[in-house]
Image (tube, rainbow, N blue to C red):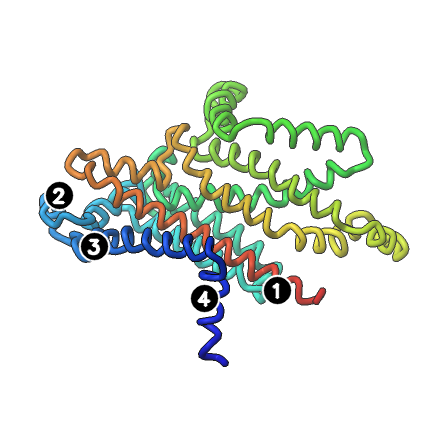
């Protein structure tokens, strides 16, 4: 029985009808035409060393030498070369705490304190000026550390703000509801590019004379405001899905409004909208590539800068493939984690 199962599955799903049979044959022919040449280009005929563009041209395949020679510029942008250990350490701390935060056993009050401490430590590492560290302006930040810093901080700050916006939109107080609705609809009606442009160009005009804000902070504010508006609508959808009986039961127990939301309503609402919330997290991570319009070199912009050298410019495909792989790894992790989290939080309702 077990031996025949793969055969039955193939017959039912791939050759179950004349149309499926034709599509399967066409798909196999397409794979035969594309996969072997790609493997030959990416692996067998690729250049893995040599240190010069000439060796890549002689090899005739992919030029992975580009990554060996230009990876520092791609990863760290314009950050001083001899100080690369600082953004590398900050990035490692971010990834480590993200990994710890993904385990339910670490969901304790100390986790919020750990994130606060990490933000302080990472800021000191990146900025410098203390403990003998050379000061580095945010205009020189770039690459993957900048992408992680902006994406993670925007998500961490926008999430609680979005919950307040969603609660405000469902509030019975007219002023609070009007402000929440106005903010959500206004921000959702604007493209992120315009918000980043306003945060970079228009916002400093309203500051007192002599007061300036770093570019990275401006971009972070724009990303946070934009992400919070979209997350608020996802959270509002979860709140609307909660049966009215849950609110009535909380009132019967004598719970206050905030106790009802914290203990009964929000845990259920957030569990229902895990997919759209994580989807917005992924969008926020990818949208960090737009900070280049305010003069910051994120991972994608740093990769483009690494390819400005005319000698390496013909091998732009390899550079962008490496950047795409980094984006894919982070986004794939968030996607798979959301599926695991859905299964974990749904155990009590099975």
1 or 4: tag closer to the N-terminus: 4
Q: Based on the displayed image, in which of its 4 quarters is residue 341 positioned?
A: bottom right
2 or 4: tag closer to the N-terminus: 4
Characterize the local packing of mark 3: few (<14), some (14-19) or many (20 or more) Cα atoms within 10 angstroms.
some
Badge 1 element: helix
From the top left corner, tell me how far across and down residue 314 is, in percent.
19, 38
Q: Residue at point 71% right, 64% down?
A: 349
According to the picture, the residue beneath numbered tag 3 turns out to be 40
Badge 3 element: helix
According to the picture, the residue beneath numbered tag 2 turns out to be 53
Which marked residue is nearer to the observer: mark 2 or mark 4?
Answer: 4
Q: Residue at point 48% right, 28% down?
A: 193
According to the picture, the residue beneath numbered tag 4 turns out to be 10
Characterize the local packing of mark 1: few (<14), some (14-19) or many (20 or more) Cα atoms within 10 angstroms.
few
According to the picture, the residue beneath numbered tag 1 turns out to be 344
From the top left corner, tell me how far across and down residue 64 is, in percent.
21, 50
């Amino acid at each position: 029985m077990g031996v025949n199962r793969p055969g039955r599955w193939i017959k039912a799903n791939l050759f179950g009808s004349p149309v499926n049979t034709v599509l399967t044959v066409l798909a196999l022919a397409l794979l035969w035409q594309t996969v072997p040449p790609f493997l030959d280009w990416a692996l067998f005929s690729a250049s893995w060393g040599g240190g010069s563009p000439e060796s890549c041209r002689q090899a005739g395949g992919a030029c992975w030498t580009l990554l060996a020679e230009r990876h520092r510029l791609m990863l760290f942008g314009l950050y001083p070369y001899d100080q690369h250990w600082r953004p590398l350490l900050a990035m490692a701390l971010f990834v480590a705490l993200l990994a710890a935060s993904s385990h339910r056993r670490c969901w304790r009050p100390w986790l919020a304190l750990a994130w606060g401490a990490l933000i302080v430590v990472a800021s000191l590492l990146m900025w410098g000026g203390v403990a003998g560290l050379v000061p580095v302006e945010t205009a020189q930040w770039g690459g993957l550390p900048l992408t992680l810093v902006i994406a993670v901080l925007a998500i961490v700050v926008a999430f609680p703000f979005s919950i307040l916006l969603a609660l405000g939109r469902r509030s019975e107080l007219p002023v609070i509801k009007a402000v929440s609705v106005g903010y959500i609809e206004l921000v959702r009606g604007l493209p992120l590019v315009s918000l980043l442009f306003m945060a970079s160009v228009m916002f400093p005009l309203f500051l007192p004379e002599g007061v300036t804000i770093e570019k990275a902070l401006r971009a972070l504010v724009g990303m946070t405001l934009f992400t919070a508006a979209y997350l608020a609508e996802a959270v509002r959808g979860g709140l609307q899905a909660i049966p009215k009986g849950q609110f009535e039961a909380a009132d019967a127990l004598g719970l206050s409004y905030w106790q009802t939301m914290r203990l009964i309503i929000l845990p259920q609402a957030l569990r229902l909208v895990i997919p759209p919330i994580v989807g917005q997290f992924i969008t926020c991570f990818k949208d960090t590539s737009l900070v280049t319009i305010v003069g910051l070199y994120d991972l994608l912009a740093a990769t483009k800068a690494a390819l400005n050298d005319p000698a390496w410019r013909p091998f732009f495909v390899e550079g962008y493939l490496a950047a795409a792989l980094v984006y894919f790894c982070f986004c794939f992790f968030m996607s798979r984690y959301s599926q695991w989290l859905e299964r974990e939080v749904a155990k009590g309702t099975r």
